[in-house]
Amino acid sequence: MIELKNLTKKFGDFTAVDGLDFKIETGEFFGLLGPNGAGKTTTISMLSTVLLPTSGEIRIDGQKLDRKASTEKSKLSVITQEYSMRQDMTVDEVMEYQGRLYYMKKKDIREKSRQLLEFAGLSPYHHRVVRYLSGGMKRKLMICRALMTEPEILLLDEPTAGMDAISRRQMWNLLRQLHGQGITILLTTHYIDEAQSLCERVALIDNGKLDIIDTPDNLIENLGAFAVDETAEDTIKSLYFHERDEAIEHLSKIGDGAVFRNTTLEDVFVERIGKRL
Amino acid sequence: MGILAVLWEKWREFRRDFYKITLAAVITPLMYLIVFGLGIQTTSHGEPYLNFLIPGIVSLSTMTGSFSAVAQNMSVQRLYEKALDQVMVSPTPLWQFILGQVIGGSLRGMYAGGLILLLTMPIRTGLIFNGWSVMIMFLNGLVFATLALVLSFLAKSYTDAPRYTAYIITPMSFLCNTFFSTDQMPMGIRQVVAVLPLSQTSGMIRSISGGLGFDPAGIVVLVIYLIIFSLISVAFVYKKKNL
C-alpha cells in the first residue's frame, strides 16, 4: 500500500504539491489526473525519491520512504516522462545496469533481459546505442527496464505521451496484463480516456491540491451519466442528466444542434478543473 | 554490491570511449612535457627541468583524469539525461553509488597518470616511481573525483562542469607545484597554495621520484580533503531536496 500523508513540495515561493493525502491499495490501478503543471510529475518524483518533500511523507507498506529505504525502493520501478537513461549505453547495457543496481544474478539478468526485449520487439536492436533509437523504442526500453526487476509497484508518468494510437493501445494492454499479475500501478496522465479505460480509482489534482478521489464510474454518475451537447454559435455547452429520459426530453426540446451521448471522465475533468483554468 | 554495479558502468564507459579518453588524457600533458621539458631546456636545482616536471605532470594528469571522469559525466547524467533517477529509485545504497563513482574516477585518473609514466619511460630520467607513488596517485584521484561529485551536485546546468574546470582545475594545474615549486611564491599565497591537494601530491611524488621518500603529512592532508568532500557529497545525495 502507498500512503501519501499531507505531502507538500515547494520550489521557493511556488507550491507544486500542496498537502496531498490519500492511499493506494495493494494491487490497485490508480490514476493521478490533472492539467499541465498540476503537480503530477512532482508527485512521481517524490515517490521515486529524486525530490524530497518539503513536508509530509510517503509510506510504502507502512514504512517511510526516503533515500535510505532500500527495502521499500526495491519494490518500486518508475517509468518517467523523460527518457531517463544513459544515452551512450546500448540497449543490453541499460538492462544489465538495471539488473546490477537491483542485485540480480548475472544469469537472471541475461534471461530476463532477453525475454523482455523479445516481448517488446527490441531484440533486433539489443546492440544499438540508446541515442540512435526512435522515441517509441526508447519508451519501450524504459518499460522493459522497469519490468526487469519484477516490481511490486509501478509508477508511470505519462507513459503514452507522444505515442501513436496503435502503440498506446499496445501499452494499455500491457498495463492491464501487469495489473492482472497483481502489480500496484500509479499512472499519471493527461489523457483522460486512458485513465477511464485503465484505472480503478482516480484522483483529480489541480494546482498541487487534491480535488476529488473516486472510481471513474462514481465520478461520472455524480455528474450525470448522460450528456447533451448544445451547439450555440461557436461554443458547445454540455448539460448532464442522471436519467436517460431526462436527457432525451431535453434533447427533444432543443431539436437541431444538440447531441445526446454518454458522459465520460473527460467531462468530469472539464467540469471540475477545466472551468477553473 | 552496488559499488560493483557502478564500477561496471564506469568500466563499460571506459571501454566504449577508450580512444577518446586516452587521447584526452595524453595530449595536453604531452604538450607541457614537449614545450617546457624538451623545447625550453633548463635546469632546476641543478638537474634537468624535465626531472622536476615529470612528477608534476603525472600528478596533474591524475587530477584532471579523475576530475573529468566524474564531473562532466555526473552533470550530464543528473541534469540532461536524468539517468541518475535510475540510481535514486534503485535499492542500491547511495553511499555505495558515491564510492563506486569515486573509485572509478580515481582509477581513470591513475590511468591518465600511468600513461604519462609510460610515455616518459624512454627518456631515461632515472626517476623512481614505486608502490607509494601509485598509492598517492590513487589517493589524489579519490580527492578530485569526490570534489567533482560535490561540484556536479551543485551544478545547475550541465555546462557548469567546464566552468568548474576553468575556475578550479586550471589554476591548480599551473600553481600547485606542477611547473615550479610553491617555495618561489610570495608569503601568504605560498602557504595557501601549499596546502592544496595537488601541491601535496606533486610534492610527495617528486620527492619519491628523487629517492628522498616523502613526508606522511601530505597523506594526512589528502585524507582530510577526502573526508570533507566525501561527507559533503553523502550529505548532498541523501539530504538535497532537489537532486
Image (cartoon, rainbow, N blue to C red):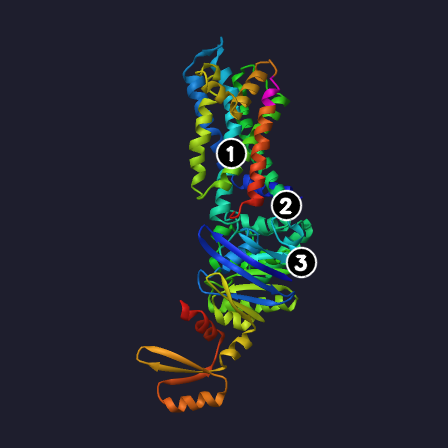
The picture places residue A65, in percent across and down from the top left corner, at: 62, 53
Q: Amino acid at mark 2?
A: Pro
Q: Measure the alpha-carbon separation of dots 1 and 3.
A: 41 Å
**Proximity of marks 3 and 2: CB atoms separated by less than 8 Å:** no
The picture places residue A15, in percent across and down from the top left corner, at: 47, 56
Disc 3 sits on a residue from what chain? A
Considering the image in quadrants, where does the N terminus of chain B appear?
top right
Q: Amino acid at mark 1?
A: Phe
Disc 1 sits on a residue from what chain? B
Identify the magenta region: B214-219
Residue wearing tag 2: B93
Q: Measure the alpha-carbon separation of dots 3 and 2.
A: 20 Å
Q: Quadrant of residue A60?
A: bottom right
Q: Measure the alpha-carbon separation of dots 1 and 2.
A: 23 Å
Residue B177 visible in the picture: no
Q: Amino acid at mark 3?
A: Gly
**Vertical relation: A17 (above or below) A169:** above
The reply, left or right, for residue A107 in relation to residue B110 is: right
The picture places residue A213, in percent across and down from the top left corner, at: 55, 69
Disc 2 sits on a residue from what chain? B
**Vertical relation: A121 (above or below) A259:** above
Q: Secondary structure at mark 1?
A: helix
On residue B67, which mark appears? 1
On residue A206, which mark appears? none
The picture places residue B107, in percent across and down from the top left corner, at: 58, 33
- Earlier in the chain: of badge 1 and badge 2, it is 1
Q: Secondary structure at mark 3?
A: loop
The reply, left or right, for residue A156 in relation to residue A236 is: right
Residue wearing tag 3: A62
Residue occupying the point 48% across, 51% down: A131
**Vertical relation: B69 (above or below) B35:** below
